[in-house]
Amino acid sequence: MIKVFSTNQDDVIRSVVAIGSTNYEFALQKLLPLLNRFGEQRKIQSKTFYSRLKADIITGCIMPPITLAFVNEFNGSARDENAIEEFISNNIENGYILDGMQRLNTLRDASDDENFKPERPLHVNIIIAERYDLLLYRMITLNNGQKPMTARHQIEMLTKGVIDLSSFNVPVNTEKETENTKVTGAFKMSDIVEAYTAYLTDNVNNQNKKIIESKLDDIVVGRVMESDLTESGISFSEILTLIDQFSSEAEGKNWLRQVNNLIGFTVGSKRSIDILQQITPLKFAEQTQKFEEAFKTINPSKVNVGKFRRELTAYLFENIGLFLDEDVSNLESAFFELTISE
């Protein structure tokens, strides 16, 4: 088991943070299998790369702490060490290894040596977050600078590993799943990841082929840290629920499956979710029709069409209360004003 000896509340990400210890044997039995929960984690480094650590483990070193995280509402006191220990014990299969993948794999290799000591201690940092959005915020802010993996990779990893799509009625497929068979009407997982990135950064424009990847990653990190993510009461799962609801109408689903529309809707709906939760899928489809009519007034040869589509979609759904029952001419006038200086 994991013995917890220090706990506290992180008031920024509204999460329980604890420090505990276990031993190598428990880590191999209970923590190592958790690596499989993130199919998109970094590739394991070559064994030669970690050969020094393997030798040190066999000799008797204390490895740097592993970071174990849970996405769950913990209803007890953040200072109740016994309650947190019990929570970890009961939920260990649902945990995620945020930091320590390479170390755990090296530990597995070291365990084959006859001199391996399974009773050696291993320290563990624990985070219990109520939302995966807040957990990812902490990952990005902690890793910024040392960059064990890029922010964009972390977003992709956590999206695929933590976001629960089990109740999502519309199929979502990865590129690997569609290599041989194309599923008609399915959302692309890569588009869901792009929408999540937009949600985290509160910005619809996170792609720019003119900017080198490392600098673009810095920009994304900066936007996440400057966003109102830790103050917002709206989770990405609530937006996914809306997307699922509106996708029950074919017209609405087909419109949302266009990635620029999906990104714009995700950002805009953060500020109007109370209104959007009250409208029907048919009413939503009517709004997409209105959008397309108004968007035709924009000359595609004069603008970056994808950028404008994302931005104007976000504008419409952020201000949906103003246009819900209005004629398309009102939206056309708004688009004119928004694009006049471009």
Image (spheres, rainbow, N blue to C red):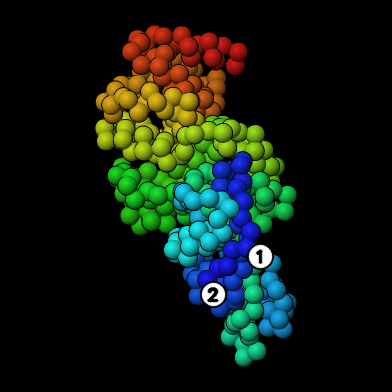
Left or right: 248 as drawn, with respect to 291 = left
Q: Label 2 amino acid?
A: Phe
State the residue position of label 1: 65
Q: Position of residue 308 (x, y in %)?
A: 52, 24
Residue at 61 percent of width and 55 percent of height = 7
235 sits to left or right of 56: left
Q: Residue at x 67, y 51 (%)?
A: 143
Q: Position of residue 1 (x, y in %)?
A: 52, 71
Residue 75 or residue 136, whichever sits in front: 75
Indicate whether 3 appears above or below 79.
below
Query: Outermost residue, bottom direction?
Result: 114
Q: Amino acid at mark 1?
A: Pro
Circle 1: element type: loop
Read off the residue under disc 2: 26
Residue 29 visible in the shown view:
yes
How many C-alpha atoms fall within 10 Å of the one at disc 2: few (<14), some, or many (≥20)?
Answer: some
